[in-house]
């Protein structure tokens, strides 16, 4: 018998599949299924997280194919970004060459896992034929007023020399290089995602196949607040101060006001006063803190009285104005009325600076209510609020809004936490922004027919704080698309999140040179039926992709509202309880595992060791176990072939045959349901393992009396059920038992509902509720028959002798109770 030579088998099938283009997909009329894993950054090496992500996707893809769907399962490269540029600076390799080499290396590694990708649809975001369309999309956004330029204060990493998003600033430091992050004023490009805030929020309810936690994260990120804008007069100042509040009902309790230190009024309010220098010093001190750090509840509240006062529009009361770290300039109006009795942040601040705390809402019926260290944030009864006293605070909310609107002192408003998407990056290795600046015509978009604007090769990586593109003379100078005079190109490139916000659309028509994608193709394949990736992308990538999809729908480029119908966020791969990572030095290299055990074992392990959404703890014994199991399957088939156990005539089924038949169909049902339901691959695999055990036992009964046809059916079932998980070894065995067609093209086994109905069922017989006897009866035995049969056994006859039977209760398939006196 041949031994299981995984290396030979895996190389052989990978080659054959690729030669035959087994996984190529065409746009047909069949029901489609689009399964997608988040595409990787081409770092050069795959890690176990990739193996897990892509193995999960591959099972789904192969399974759906066998279920008769026309499956799209593409792969590509999120190929722009900082590491390539840093490698260029460090090692002097051009980012393009570095990236290309890494893609080749990683593609080999992915192929060594036997993943069923349609490589004809491969995209790399750094290729001209891709970024041409990213630029084209930018122009469509621009024409719709959804891409605009604005001067703004941005997080700036002096070491990476680039703008950072708030999420990339951790504890005041750059997420990438750990340098202290500063602020800088820059003229930047933005996408107007805030125009879609309401739609993005509303449509979360369409995402039935998404994990709840991700939906909540998106909801919080958009952060809709319903409230009001209230105008306070500032004493001796020409302008009024607008504040945004979610609690107009607390307006009488506003005992001080806070402006964000960067609020435009601050300079004028402190001008030529003793507070001028203090305020300036305070603003400087906050420069390096990110918004997240400034508003975190753990951050000590800090502020400064600026010597001025406001007048409360309803109470007429005069209250002091502060600047403070916890009020942000770009949320709401950048200023607040502070109500320490009912807002914890305000209370902490008021206690620290000894400001009055005035409760204006109290719990119903609580006479000696008092605020101590905790703000009262619930609803209740109005107090200290003039004419509104005694009202329910909910009713007061509306009445106060009505009054403010009547007096012209305020209005109801909605505020979103979501900010516009800053997309400019002062980097080289990204999609050039297709814009030209002309002294005569101003900002001029590049003509569509002149796309792509190519990344030049003659750049210097100077580290001077400007985009390297500014060093390319050939790039910068260009005629103005409108007037033809010499003009200058934009030298910023796009955030790589722009590239990844539409790659799943390009896969539907990846080779199209005439348009971004054919409308028919995109509408046939979209939405993605199953998206799989890490939860670290739960907010930005998914939100940006949803935003793009909605804009493209409004541009009539496609018809779907949402890009991803179902989302699976896979858990982490841990070792010794911690996430596998280079920095912790606890990684296991996929290449080593594949070398030592084969790809099928590696795949089977990551699929079997935990359900996809849970974290998976690496275990060498677990890997060994999976390897042993595949060897066991191999031997089972080899022995069966060697002993001619897969050929024979039809025979009536014996008791053992019936049991095996039952197990075969029950396993099909179980594995199918495990995959269909919540991708419980771990239990699906153990189902197959049990069936393999049963086949081994069956084989031992008596070689001459076996029902070979049934045994063969069992073997075939194992091979087919296992094929999405361990595609190489099953393909080899499938051919060995005589099939010419790939297992990938076979139909997924169907179970026979008749076969899993157990024919006999055990019934308990009770006397006065006490179990006295058990018996096996045909499943279909009726109530009347059961009543009759219950007393017939020898044991029952004895037990009932001399007793008077009062009543017999029979419940088919369960029990008979005989009530006696
Ligand atoms: C008075 C008040 C009383 C407030 C009260 C809350 C409770 P969300 O729900 O997150 O939208 N706020 C407004 N603008 C702010 C800014 N730029 N920086 C920091 N805080 C700001 O929160 C809205 C509430 O956060 C607003 O309602 C305001 O405080 C504060 F019992 O106004 B509130
Ligand atoms: Zn011009």
Image: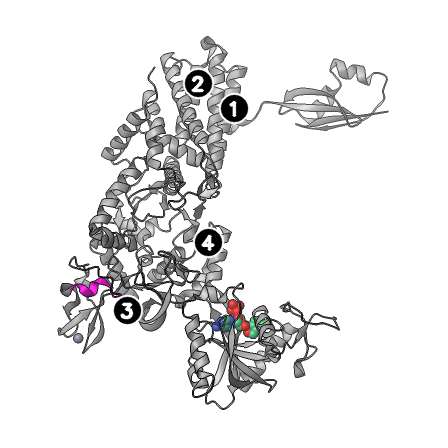
Horizontal relation, residue 757 to residue 714: left or right: right
Dot 2 corresponds to which residue?
711
Say the numbered circle drawn on residue 662: 1
Q: CA distance from mark 3 to mark 2?
A: 67 Å
Q: CA distance from mark 1 to mark 2?
A: 12 Å
Quadrant in which the N terminus appears: top left
Q: Is residue 468 magenta?
A: yes
Dot 3 corresponds to which residue?
143
At x 43%, y 72%, the residue is 285
Q: CA distance from mark 1 to mark 4?
A: 39 Å
Asked if labels 2 and 1 touch by Cβ distance under 8 angstroms, the answer is no
Instruction: Identify the main secondary structure in magenta.
Output: loop
Chain part drawn in magenta? 460-472
Quadrant in which the C terminus appears: top right
First reached walking from the N terminus: tag 3 or tag 2: 3
Q: Is residue 477 magenta?
A: no
The image shows residue 370 at horizontal and vertical percentages of 70, 72
The image shows residue 793 at horizontal and vertical percentages of 73, 15
Asked if labels 4 and 3 touch by Cβ distance under 8 angstroms, the answer is no
Task: Find ligand 2 in the image and state its quadrant.
Answer: bottom left
First reached walking from the N terminus: tag 1 or tag 2: 1
Dot 4 corresponds to which residue?
207
First reached walking from the N terminus: tag 3 or tag 4: 3
Is the CB atom of the residue marked by disc 1 within 8 angstroms of ligand 1's nearest atom? no
First reached walking from the N terminus: tag 4 or tag 2: 4
Q: Mark yes or no: residue 717 visible.
A: no
Is 282 situated above or below 712?
A: below
Horizontal relation, residue 442 to residue 666: left or right: left
């Amino acid at each position: 018998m041949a031994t299981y030579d995984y290396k030979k088998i895996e190389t052989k099938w990978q080659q054959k599949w690729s030669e035959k283009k087994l996984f190529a997909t065409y746009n047909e009329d069949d029901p489609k299924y689009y399964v997608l894993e988040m595409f990787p950054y081409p770092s050069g090496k795959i890690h176990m997280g990739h193996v897990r992500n892509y193995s999960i996707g591959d099972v789904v893809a192969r399974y759906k194919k066998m279920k008769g769907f026309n499956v799209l399962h593409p792969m590509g490269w999120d190929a722009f970004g900082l590491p390539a540029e840093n490698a260029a600076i460090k090692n002097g390799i051009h980012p393009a060459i570095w990236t290309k080499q890494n893609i080749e290396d990683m593609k080999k590694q992915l192929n060594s896992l036997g993943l069923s990708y349609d490589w004809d649809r491969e995209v790399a975001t750094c290729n001209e034929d891709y970024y041409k369309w990213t630029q084209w999309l930018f122009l469509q956004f621009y024409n719709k007023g959804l891409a605009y330029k604005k001067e703004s204060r941005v997080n700036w990493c002096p070491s990476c020399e680039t703008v950072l998003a708030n999420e990339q600033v951790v504890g005041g430091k750059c997420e990438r290089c750990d340098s202290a992050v500063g602020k800088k004023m820059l003229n930047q490009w933005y996408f107007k995602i805030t125009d879609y805030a309401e739609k993005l929020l509303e449509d979360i309810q369409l995402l039935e196949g998404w994990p709840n936690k991700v939906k909540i994260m998106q909801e919080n990120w958009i952060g809709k607040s319903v409230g009001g804008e209230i105008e306070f007069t500032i004493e001796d100042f020409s302008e009024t101060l607008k504040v945004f509040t979610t609690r107009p009902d607390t307006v009488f309790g506003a005992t001080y006001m806070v402006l964000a230190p960067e609020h435009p009024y601050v300079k004028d309010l402190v001008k030529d006063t003793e507070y001028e220098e203090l305020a300036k010093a305070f603003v400087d001190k906050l420069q390096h803190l990110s918004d997240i750090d400034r508003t975190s509840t753990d951050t000590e509240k800090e502020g400064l009285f600026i010597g001025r006062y406001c007048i409360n529009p309803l109470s007429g009361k005069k209250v002091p104005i502060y600047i403070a770290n916890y009020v942000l300039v770009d949320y709401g109006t950048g200023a607040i009325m502070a109500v320490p009795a009912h807002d914890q942040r305000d209370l902490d601040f008021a206690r620290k600076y000894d400001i009055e705390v005035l409760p204006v809402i109290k719990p119903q019926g609580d006479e000696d209510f008092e605020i101590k260290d905790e703000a009262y944030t619930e609803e209740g009864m109005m107090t200290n609020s003039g004419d509104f006293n005694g009202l329910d605070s909910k009713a007061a909310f509306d009445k106060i809004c009505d009054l403010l609107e009547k007096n012209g002192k305020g209005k109801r408003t909605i505020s979103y936490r979501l900010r516009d998407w800053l997309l400019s990056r002062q980097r080289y290795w990204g999609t050039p922004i297709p814009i030209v600046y002309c002294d005569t015509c101003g900002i001029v978009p590049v003509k569509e027919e002149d796309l792509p604007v190519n990344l030049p090769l003659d750049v210097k990586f100077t580290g001077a704080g400007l985009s390297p593109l500014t060093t390319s003379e050939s790039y910068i100078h260009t005629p103005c698309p409108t007037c033809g005079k010499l003009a200058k190109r934009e030298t910023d490139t796009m955030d790589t999140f722009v590239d990844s916000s539409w790659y799943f659309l390009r896969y539907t028509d990846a080779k199209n040179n005439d348009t971004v994608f054919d409308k028919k193709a995109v509408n046939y394949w979209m939405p993605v039926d199953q998206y799989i990736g890490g939860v670290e992308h739960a907010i930005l990538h998914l939100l940006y992709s949803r935003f793009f999809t909605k804009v493209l729908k409004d541009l009539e480029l496609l018809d779907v509202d949402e890009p991803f119908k179902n989302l699976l966020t896979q858990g982490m791969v841990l070792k010794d309880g911690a996430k596998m990572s280079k920095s912790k030095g606890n990684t296991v290299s996929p290449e080593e595992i594949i070398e030592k055990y084969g790809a099928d074992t590696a795949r089977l392990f990551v699929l079997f060791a935990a359900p996809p959404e849970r974290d998976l703890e690496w275990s060498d014994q677990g890997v060994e176990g999976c390897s042993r199991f595949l060897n066991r399957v191999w031997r089972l088939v080899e022995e069966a072939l060697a002993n001619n156990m897969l050929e024979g005539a039809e025979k009536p089924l014996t008791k053992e045959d019936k049991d095996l038949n039952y197990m075969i169909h029950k396993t099909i049902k179980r594995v199918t349901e495990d995959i269909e339901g919540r991708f419980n691959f771990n239990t699906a695999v153990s189902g197959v393992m049990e069936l393999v055990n049963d086949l081994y036992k069956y084989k031992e009964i008596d070689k001459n009396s076996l029902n070979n046809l049934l045994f063969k059916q069992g073997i075939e079932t194992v091979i087919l059920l296992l094929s999405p998980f361990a595609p190489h070894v099953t393909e080899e065995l499938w051919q060995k038992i005589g099939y010419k067609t790939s297992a990938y093209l076979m139909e997924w086994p169907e179970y026979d509902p008749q076969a899993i109905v157990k024919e006999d069922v055990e019934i308990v017989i009770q006397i006065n509720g006490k179990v006295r006897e058990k018996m096996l009866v045909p499943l279909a035995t009726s109530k009347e028959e059961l009543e009759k049969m219950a007393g017939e056994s020898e044991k029952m006859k004895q037990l009932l002798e001399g007793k008077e039977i009062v009543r017999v209760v029979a419940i088919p398939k369960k029990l008979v109770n005989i009530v006696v006196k």
